[in-house]
């Protein structure tokens, strides 16, 4: 049984990983962590450094959670990377982080979260960042 979690080095990404850890421990599930730059921009702030990913892997190892980390470097849209990973892994759940939005902004989700929610064939847990 597998959970796929979309990760970026931010409050939203940390909230998603924290929720994924809780779910993995509760249900004895494996994690697939997916990180990619925006449309192949591997120099942007969403593309995690090797230090970020090593620290995350060390945390998961320390907790005894079976996991893999995927970081596609091709010009793939983040939502596609998450959905493709979920399909390959036969995921039972996808977890994504979402940003706090203004009342007007709440009418629209971010493009990645919206696409994952609309196109996923399994349940999606959208987790807000905590302050």
Image (cartoon, rainbow, N blue to C red):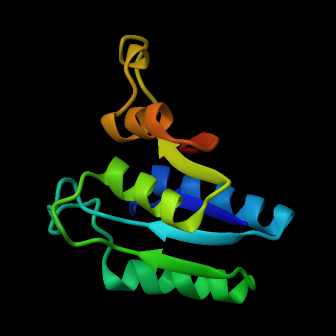
- Between 102 and 75, the one lying in front of the other is 75
- Between 90 and 82, the one lying in front of the other is 90
Whether residue 8 sits left or right of residue 56 in the image: it is left
Quarter location, residue 110: top left
Q: Residue at x 53, y 44 (%)?
A: 129
**In which quadrant is the N terminus drawn?**
bottom right
Whether residue 24 sits left or right of residue 57 in the image: it is right
Give the image location of residue 22, x and y in percent. Answer: 75, 61
Q: Is residue 99 visible?
A: no
Quarter location, residue 113: top left
Whether residue 116 sits left or right of residue 79 in the image: it is right
- Placement of 45 over or under 31, stated as above or below: above
- Placement of 105 over or under 9, stated as above or below: above
Give the image location of residue 128, x and y in percent. Answer: 56, 39
Q: Is residue 70 visible?
A: yes
- Between 95 and 13, the one lying in front of the other is 95
Give the image location of residue 104, x and y in percent. Answer: 36, 11
Quarter location, residue 74: bottom left
**In which quadrant is the C terminus drawn?**
top right
- Placement of 119 over or under 71, stated as above or below: above
Whether residue 116 sits left or right of residue 4 in the image: it is left
């Amino acid at each position: 049984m597998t959970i796929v979690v979309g990760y970026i080095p931010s409050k939203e990404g940390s909230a998603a990983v924290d929720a994924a850890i809780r779910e993995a421990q509760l249900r004895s599930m494996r994690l697939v962590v997916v990180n990619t730059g925006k449309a192949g921009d591997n120099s942007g702030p969403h593309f995690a450094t090797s230090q970020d990913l090593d620290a995350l892997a060390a945390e998961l190892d320390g907790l005894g959670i079976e996991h893999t980390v995927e970081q596609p470097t091709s010009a793939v849209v983040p939502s596609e990377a998450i959905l493709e990973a979920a399909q390959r892994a036969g995921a039972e759940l996808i977890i994504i982080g979402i940003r706090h939005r203004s009342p007007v902004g709440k009418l629209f989700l971010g493009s990645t979260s919206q696409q994952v929610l609309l196109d996923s064939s399994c349940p999606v847990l959208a987790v807000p960042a905590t302050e």
